[in-house]
Amino acid sequence: MSSSDDVTRTTLPNGFTLMELLIVMAIIAILMLIAIPTVGSLTKKANDLSAVQSIHAIQQAEIQYSSTYPSNGFACTLPALGGDPNGGPPSATGAQILQGDLTSGFKSGYIFTIACKDKVTVNSIDRYNSYAITAVPQTVGKTGDRAFCSDQSGMIKFDPAGGSNCTQSLGQ
């Protein structure tokens, strides 16, 4: 090979051209626009499932609470079902049955509450014979679409509008 052959040989550019990079970025942006609504709906469905499972956990905790503290009946607050295991032995105000993430009342985009009903006072001790659990999305349409409710019967119902008017059976 002579030195003149080296001069006439063209070199290929290294890397991608700007047009190729723009096309790849446009394809990635289109795929992201397709995937983002899917991720949002999957998150809402996961939050819904978590809310139903949390209601099951609260129901089990209420059954255990009422058998452990029969003179009190059912617990009227989530903190009464929870409690710090390092704070001493379990009591009627901190039974240490329910996990801490639920006793706060907020989990996976839902707000949980318990309301007691059917109070009977015997020997100056209030006994609650029934309760109602509600799980309402923190932001309807964003963290969840439906609200869930249950009581001592164990039946879980839902409100498709996300409110607390649970009239439709979940169909467990």
Image: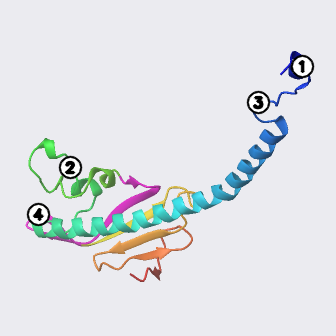
Q: Residue at x 26, y 62 (%)?
A: 76
- The amino acid pointed to by label 3 is Asn
Distance, label 3 to label 1, CA atoms, is 19 Å
Distance, label 1 to label 4, CA atoms, is 105 Å
Query: Image quarter for residue 20?
Result: top right
Distance, label 4 to label 3, CA atoms, is 87 Å
Where does label 1 land, which residue? Answer: 7
Where does label 3 land, which residue? Answer: 14
Circle nearer the viewer, 3 or 1: 1
Q: Nearer the viewer, residue 144 or 19?
A: 19
Question: Which mark is first along the chain, 1 or 2?
Answer: 1
Question: Which mark is first along the chain, 4 or 2?
Answer: 2
Give percent across and percent down for residue 66.
Answer: 16, 69
Q: Quadrant of the C terminus?
A: bottom left
Q: Is residue 66 visible?
A: yes
Q: How many marks?
A: 4
Distance, label 2 to label 1, CA atoms, is 82 Å
Q: Are marks 2 and 1 in contact (CB under 8 Å)?
A: no
Q: Are marks 4 and 3 in contact (CB under 8 Å)?
A: no
Question: Which mark is first along the chain, 3 or 4?
Answer: 3
Where does label 2 land, which residue? Answer: 83
Circle nearer the viewer, 3 or 2: 3
